[in-house]
Amino acid sequence: MQLKGLFVLMGVFAAGAFWGHADSSLPPARAGYAAQAAAADDAQLRLARAYLKLAELDLQRALDGNQRVPALYPRTLLDSLQDTVQMARNRVEQLTAKGDRHSVYLQNAELEIRTTQERLARAQAANRQSPGAVPALELDRLTARLEMAHANLECVKSMKDAPAEELLQWRVDQLRADVLDLRNTILFSNARL
């Protein structure tokens, strides 16, 4: 996934965690805020739909590339692109239904567990077929990532009735961890060059 796309996605989720929905029951003094919130909701939905379209196009580009040149893009990239599409769909659904943010965070946490389990299973299968194909350190990393995904799901479940500010802080912490993880991935990739 392109770095720019990741930052757009982070913006979509961060904005979604911050802005509330328009509420017609607000006092008249807050009516201006309600109009601003409604406009922000519309803008967020347009942004989320645009990001979903971009994510789908990125995935299609990779799939088309692999049809032309087998294994041009590795399975891990395809998985990541598919996850991005699903997370973007979850966001659009949440904004369209004016649903609660918690359900989207829950879906995304469950998606992270499934994806990590699949990656770990593929790595273990590769090692059964060809011992040492996936280094033990990478298996340990995937196992740790799976433990982290389960812990994240528990955090999300425990925050079902949390105030919006607490949910926002949790999401900011998640984004911060994602940025650090991305930075480390880039640093490792650059170190190999």
Image (spheres, rainbow, N blue to C red):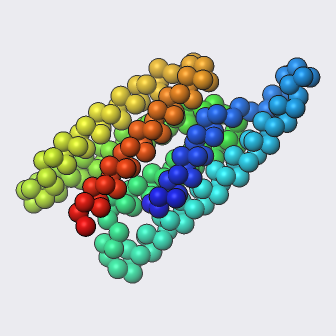
The residue located at (71%, 31%) in the rendering is: 20
The residue located at (74%, 33%) in the rendering is: 21
Q: Residue furthest left?
A: 131
Vertical comparison of 83 with 33: above or below:
below
The C terminus lies in quadrant? bottom left
Quarter of the image where one finds residue 13: top right
Pinpoint residue 127: horizontal percent, then vertical percent. 13, 54
Pinpoint residue 39: horizontal percent, then vertical percent. 80, 43
Q: How many marks?
A: 0
* 47 relative position to 137: left or right: right
The residue located at (52%, 57%) in the rendering is: 5
* 10 relative position to 38: left or right: left
Pinpoint residue 120: horizontal percent, then vertical percent. 25, 47
* 40 relative position to 15: left or right: right
The N terminus lies in quadrant? bottom left
Q: Residue furthest right?
A: 28
Vertical comparison of 188 with 167: above or below:
below
Given residues 19 and 133, the one toward you in this image is 19
The residue located at (62%, 24%) in the rendering is: 164
